[in-house]
Image (cartoon, coloured by chain):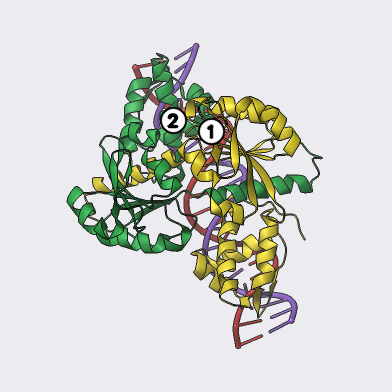
Chain colours: A green, B yellow, C purple, D red
Amino acid sequence: MKWVKVPPIAIGRLSEYLRALERLEREGRKAISSWRLAGETGINPAHVRRDLTYFGQFGRPGVGYEVSKLREKVASILGLGKERKMALVGVGNLGTALSSYKAFKERGFRIIALFDNDGKKIGKRRGNLTIQDIKELPRVVGRENIEIGLITVPASSAQEVSDALVAAGIKAILNLAPTRISVPERIIVINVDSTVALERVSHFLSASERKQGSHRR
Amino acid sequence: MKWVKVPPIAIGRLSEYLRALERLEREGRKAISSWRLAGETGINPAHVRRDLTYFGQFGRPGVGYEVSKLREKVASILGLGKERKMALVGVGNLGTALSSYKAFKERGFRIIALFDNDGKKIGKRRGNLTIQDIKELPRVVGRENIEIGLITVPASSAQEVSDALVAAGIKAILNLAPTRISVPERIIVINVDSTVALERVSHFLSASERKQGSHRR
DNA sequence: CACTGTGAACCCGTTCACAGCA
DNA sequence: TGCTGTGAACGGGTTCACAGTG
């Protein structure tokens, strides 16, 4: 395998391939061409091939890719081979929603601890977990070897929570608060920001209003 | 103003500038340089200036940008001048979370109708809204002039819901289901996919494991 | 023959560096 | 002088086009 740099955006596309491959496998398909996989995902065929070759050579000229083998390969590139333990901080509506999110469990992402700083919530249960005092975070993260922190607190306390997670020894953060956080270089942070997303929607809406519906595009 | 094409990613950065500007304004700051705004947002100063000039010339050489004027400008580019009506489909945990999401209200995004197809939920209330049968969607969207649809149903029914929203005359969709949807060209779709985000985290985690913590990055 | 893997061209977003202005 | 606005260089991601292969 040659060493070429992988464009970070390619990782997101792998997730799309994975979903398509899972669907195809369920439908009983054995082999698939880059061409067809492109059709499934709306990504250009050359792009599909390029993305896959960043990580090795999985296809056979004249045949295509073996669905189940490729699915496994992609899953492994995405690090889905092993379970990951996660801690969720901020058990509001969003936190509660995520704590029971099926799509996470199916992928091996397990939320094993819930934290909040609201005395009224501490001790209450969500599913089969008990909400703990945020002060317990260092202890629990250490004891349970939790790797990923989910931030679902308001923007105003996101940085503080992030600092606590980092201090507790977490390796990666999925930040769902509508603000950016700063962390040391070694920490992996991915932001999921529905407010920014909605502002994007809003911009394109008003841009299309500005041209008065004259064009189609 | 000259006509240069705006890179779509720039829109997301405008949201970041807006937040920084709101904060600065609260702190009573009057003027700000691209340099300092860059510091606030972690974006390169030349980048900040470039992004802003896509939409006009807002700064004064030797002085910088007037905070409150620029904030207004950016908000207007993001189409935040007027209220937007939204309908939410899928009142599970995530839907419930979003239906009371402060960050949306503050920006003028108003969820004014909730829909579900679960007979047990229909008629129940969330905040001051009553959950309606999804069959009512065309009527309500038409009557209330709803522009944006929020999809918070499971992946398996996202496409169906999307089709219904489009048929009802919605203009844009914020899709929070963990799957892509296909829509006619004229419809604006933005995806917020925490599963893909988590897989990204997972990938970078296992990539950093592979190099055994030998480098610091 | 059908399809992969990839060099090379292309395109677009980013950043530099500086002319020009208050 | 201090900063913006922008031409131009750069760099990285995308796509083309085809040589190579089972």
Q: Are marks 1 and 2 in contact (CB under 8 Å)?
A: no
Query: Which amino acid lies under the numbered mark 1 shown in the image of this protein?
Result: Gly
Which structural element holds mark 2? helix
Instruction: Say whether residue A56 is visible.
Output: no
The residue that appears at 69% across and 70% down in the rendered structure is B69
Which structural element holds mark 1? loop
Observer-nearest of A159 and B3: A159
Observer-nearest of B192 and A54: B192
Q: Is residue A165 left or right of residue A215?
A: left
- Residue A145 at what x, y percent from top left? 21, 49
The residue that appears at 60% across and 62% down in the rendered structure is B18
Q: Is residue B185 above or below residue A170?
A: above
- Residue B40 at what x, y percent from top left? 51, 68
The residue that appears at 70% across and 39% down in the rendered structure is B146
Q: Looking at the rendering, which quadrant does residue B73 occupy? A: bottom right
Query: Which amino acid lies under the numbered mark 2 shown in the image of this protein?
Result: Tyr
Marks 1 & 2 on one chain: no
Q: Which chain is mark 1 on?
A: B
Name the front one of labels 1 and 2. Answer: 1
For the N terminus of chain B, the quadrant is: bottom right
Q: Which chain is mark 2 on?
A: A
